Amino acid sequence: MYKIYSRKDLVMGKIAFVFPGQGAQIPFMGKDFYENYDVCRKIFHEAEKGLGIDLKNLIFSEDIRLNDTRYTQPAMVLVSIMMIEAIKSHGIVPDITCGLSLGEYSALNASGYLDFMDIMKLIKLRGDLMSSCGEKYKGYMAALIGLKDEKLQELIEEGKKHGIISVANYNCPGQIVVTGEEEAVQWAVDNIRTYKGIKGIKLNVSGAFHSILMEDASTGLNKEFHNLSMKDSLIPMALNFDGTISNDKEYIRNALVEGIKSPVHFQQCVEAMKKFGVTTFIEIGPGKTLTSFIKKIDRGLNTFNIDSVKALEELIENLKDTKEEL
């Protein structure tokens, strides 16, 4: 197993695997892993058979269904798990894991709490339930940029006069996501400058995720989740629900169920992982969203992004070079 060292001070630190959520998906993601790793092809076809979805056509093409919550969720988690298997085949394993919203289910796999197909079936259900809630209770989300913490609560309280609104994500300094009913969320976007923010951006999502409008999805997921047998693991997770670190499988299960209707405390998760001893974060999956958040939280942290076979090869070379320096 590799341990990553900082080139700056050569102090050994812990590794965190972190996983992006819905919105990071792109066509053809993970295709090079499918083409270059037998283990990736094996689990890909296992997922296709188990879920009854033509995943190859869905992911390795310009299929518009990739942006439909029902399909986005299993596609994203499958691709992340393919990448996990490829990375682990080189002896690189995490000391702790964390995901952003949907990414928590990839983290669940990386830490070893649930079998692969149990996760895939669970995440397909999650996508179906959240999509149904989005159709039943039309909701919206928006990123609020440059809003100070002390002004956030003022904006939320005033926004509640226009409908349901709450915080969905505490991503990093200067970026908060709100969720709720259309009129309230639109009011927050239109009035952010009044509260000394920079701008508000409505997000292209199919529902008010991480809000009380997802109550039905949380209830449905809870029933199925408790039918699954979770394993014990020594690799903890930093949990979005409250920003704490745990390897208590029942606590993790409940945190993920509650997380559908509760805020994502990603910044708090990063701070907790720093205290845990993490100095290196490896983002696994398409895009560099989490890498950007982590650098805004603490520019001194080491970050890598694995979204291609080439990026994985570069990480392996970096590890070899660092070991030689020591």
Image: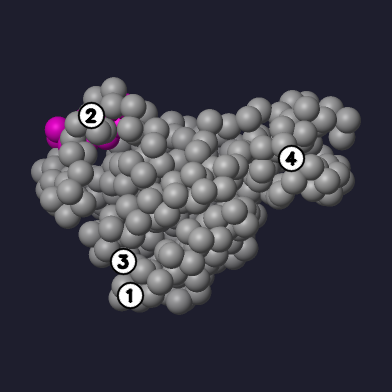
- Name which of mark 1 and mark 3 comes first in the sequence: 3
Give the labeled residue for mark 3.
114
> The residue tagged with tag 4: helix, strand or loop?
helix
What is the three-letter code of the residue carrying label 4? Ala
Q: Residues within 10 Å of mark 3 (few under 14, many from 20)?
A: many
Q: Residue at x 50, y 71 (%)?
A: 254
> Are the residues flagged by discs 3 and 2 in contact, CB closer than 8 Å?
no
Q: Nearer the viewer, mark 1 or mark 3?
A: 1
Q: Residue at x 39, y 37 (%)?
A: 68
> The residue tagged with tag 1: helix, strand or loop?
loop
Q: Residues within 10 Å of mark 2 (few under 14, many from 20)?
A: some
**Residue 170, position as x, y percentages in the image:** 66, 47
Give the labeled residue for mark 1.
227
Question: In this rendering, would 141 be left or right of 195?
Answer: left
Q: Which residues are drawn in magenta?
A: 27-36
Real-space Cα distance between discs 1 and 2? 32 Å
Real-space Cα distance between discs 1 and 4? 37 Å
Q: Residue at x 18, y 35 (%)?
A: 56
Real-space Cα distance between discs 1 and 3? 12 Å
Question: In this rendering, would 190 be left or right of 250?
Answer: right
Real-space Cα distance between discs 2 and 4? 38 Å
- Name which of mark 1 and mark 4 comes first in the sequence: 4
Residue 143 in sight: yes
Give the labeled residue for mark 4.
184
The residue positioned farthest toward the top in the image shown: 62
Give the labeled residue for mark 2.
60
